[in-house]
Structure formats: C-alpha cells, structure tokens
Image (tube, helix red, strand yellow):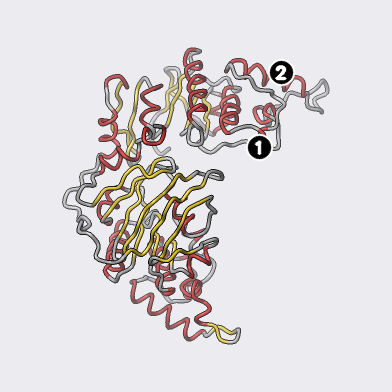
Amino acid sequence: RDSGELWLDGRPVEIDDPRHAQALGIGIVHQELNLMNHLSAAQNIFIGREPRGRFGVFLDEERLNAQAAAVFQRLNVQLDPRVCVGELSVARQQMVEIAKALSFDSRVLIMDEPTAALNPQEVAELFRTVRRLKEQGVGIVYISHKMDELQQIADRVTVMRDGRSVGTRRMADTTVGEIINWMVGRELGDLPRAHSGAPCGAVALEVRGLTRRKGGHPLHDVNFTLRRGEVLGFAGLMGAGRTEVARAVFGADAVDSGEIRVHGQVVRIRSPRDAVAAGIGYLSEDRKHFGLATGLDLRSNVAMASLSRFTRRGFVDDDAVDKAATRSVQQLGIKTPSIRQTVRLLSGGNQQKIVIAKWLLRDCDILIFDEPTRGIDVGAKAEIYRLLHALAERGKAIVVISSELPELLRLAQRVVVMCEGRITGELSAADATQERIMELATRREAITS
C-alpha cells in the first residue's frame, strides 16, 4: 500500500508479505482454488510445513493426516485426509482451502467469492461452516456480488466502488435496493445515450437454446437476436456467462446443444475458423493473449485474419499488406511511428484499434466486442465509442460485453442481462437504468425457481 494503517487486535501492524499475514492469523480463500489436484487433502493443507520424522529427513505421513483430520473435525467436515484432491467436488475442494487457511490458526478469514462454482446444496454446506467458524470467534470478511448470500450470513455490509469504500451498515438495517444504489453510485449526467428506436436492419445473428452443462461456466438455454446496424449490450456480474456466450458463438468453446443462424441460415460453428468464414469477428477481453501477436509489427497483426487475400502461389504480397495496413491506420486514427512498429510498444487504446482493424479488413458483418475499453484511458475510450457507433451506422451488427454500466447505457440500443449462465432479462435503451440492470444481474430467484 502507499498509505493507510492496518490494525489487528487493537494494535497497528505492518504486514510484509502473505507468509507474515498467515503468521499473524490472517487467512484467505481465493476466488480461484489454489490446490494441487495430484496431492492428498492433507498434503495440500500443510504443503511446505509437513511434519517430519525423528531425524528430520522423511515426512511423517501419519502425523500429517492426523493434523489434517483435526482441522476437518474443527470444521465438522467428514473428509478423509488421504483422499486425492482431484477426486473431490468443487465444494469439497473449497473445504480443503478453508482448512488450509485455518491450519495457520487464522483468527481472520477472508473469503473471495467462495460460492462462484457451487450449487445450492454446496452453498448451504459452506454457510453452515461459516456460521460454525463465527461461533468459534473467527472474524470473516465475505466478498460477494450475490445479495441473497449477504442477507443470509452478513452482520454488516461494506460496499466498495472504484477502489473506494462508499459506506458500511448493519445488514439488518439496509435493503438490497440500497446496496445496489451504493454499488451503482455514478451520476450519468448528460452522458449521451444510445438511440432507442428499433433498428431498421434485418436480423444478422440469431442464437437459439445455446446450452453447455459441463466445462467451465455452464450456459442454460441462451436465446437472443442481433440486427444489422444495432449495438446489443450484454451485462452481468463476474461469472454470469457473458464471455462464455461469446466464445461459444465464435466456436472457441464447445456446447451441448443450440442453434446459430447468420442472416437467416443455420451455420455449424465448431471452431473460430468456421465463425470467421460465417462473417463473425470476436475481440476478446484479453487482447494481448487472444487478439494480438504482440511480438509482431502492426502490419502483420492487421493482415493476420485475411492473409489468404494477400497470398499468391505461397508468397505474401508485402506491398498489398502495407497498403491495407496504412489505410487502417488512417481510417481508425491509430497513433504509431510506422506500420512496422512492434505492437507491444503501442498504447492499449492503439492496440485495441489494431484488433478492430484486423476484423474490419476481414469485413466481418457481425462483431463481438468483449470489454472493448478495458485498460485504456478516457480519451481512447471516447474514440472507441465513436468507432462503434460509426460501424453500426455502416450496417455492422455489434455485440458489446461490458462490466461498466454507463458504457452499455451509452452504446447499446438493447441490453441483455445475464446471471449464472442464464438470461434474466432484456431492456431497451429507453427502459435501461443502472439500477434495473443490477436488479436483473442479481436475480438468482429466476434461476432457482
């Protein structure tokens, strides 16, 4: 940290690193499980701290398992310490993570989105454990977007927004609506809004019954349409399934069932190559890993998705590539010393424009933008917004996935809202507000009913 104080048991403390925090009795259960699947539960809990035999050379497996069993007993969890973690359900693995944190005699336990991958029965089991720890005097910081969970187990709730704490209240004295207002918090002011009139173009993309039951985040019967000249927004909290829908439509992830129609024709998309052939371009939220070859120059990245157009008898026409890259730089206002500049040396906003240029050169009719302004400055954001509107005016059909609600309200003519792999609602630009979007994004009763 740059400033501020940390107090533990009424005294200020300086925490040097995670090991020091553990020694002080502060444990954390990360949002992403941090276990080694090929090791046993006991080995995971005491990794690096294993008890050793008389001469300190060999590990004492018997003592190791006994110590792990004692921690499980404290949690009232029936679990064999010798079981291989990879054989356990996600909920049981979560219990191993909690046991690992408590094995440091933690008095403060931080739990970051612990139910992200759990079903309702597993959530109930976790909550019983949380209440038991609370009775034992453990202080728990429980980080969650799920309002119903906070209502069940929180004594007090603190809301953070844009890196700042905006308020703390007793849970019994507040409502879900008040929490959502705190979470939203931004004044839209005179922010330009997307025009709410019905798009005049024909349906460009239709998704019916898209379903995936296993592997990553599941998807449940996802249906939506996208028209030419329209910007369709996708909203939802982390883990809602927005990116998973985009990757499924683009053929990057397999699905169990569902139908995709492009310009009214059913298309079979089993790979990104199939999607590109059907006229679909996808700008990933992680442009550096999935959108760019950062070690190559600008011209190579722009031409990458259309290389066959510049190839004759196995040779690349460098002059044609240079001309196409130069046109893209001028068209999108990419700031670069030259078209041969290495992409990793350019700013985030200009890198994003290069990804857009790649798909525009390919002349994709349908463009999916996943977090298009993540990691770029305010000026570059405004340029991306203008570009998206210009593309829509040219008849392109655009999906924008964004975690920034003002961004969606500014760009989208309709907003589809997801929660835990399902679409929970759709709002027109005229009806969409940050509060209504957040209500739909946390509407878990629509899933469990």
The disc labelled 2 sits on which kind of residue? Answer: Ala
Disc 2 secondary structure class: helix
Q: Residues within 10 Å of mark 1 (few under 14, many from 20)?
A: some
Seen at 70% across and 32% down, the residue is: 84
Q: Is residue 231 left or right of residue 24?
A: left
Q: Where does residue 326 sit, x and y in percent of width and height?
A: 40, 79
Seen at 24% across and 51% down, the residue is: 428
Q: Where does residue 324 sit, x and y in percent of width and height?
A: 42, 80
| Quarter of the image that includes the N terminus | top left
Residue that label 2 marks: 66
* Cα–Cα gap, marks 1 and 2: 20 Å
Q: Is 223 or 43 nearer to us in this picture?
A: 223
Q: Is residue 13 left or right of residue 86?
A: left
The outermost residue toward the left is 190
Q: Is residue 246 above or below residue 7?
A: below
Residue 441: give its label: none
Disc 1 secondary structure class: loop
Residue that label 1 marks: 36
Residue 337 occupies which quadrant of the picture?
bottom left
Seen at 41% across and 32% down, the residue is: 448
Q: Is 299 or 10 nearer to us in this picture?
A: 299
Q: Is residue 236 above or below residue 47?
A: below
Q: Where does residue 421 sit, x and y in percent of width and height?
A: 44, 43
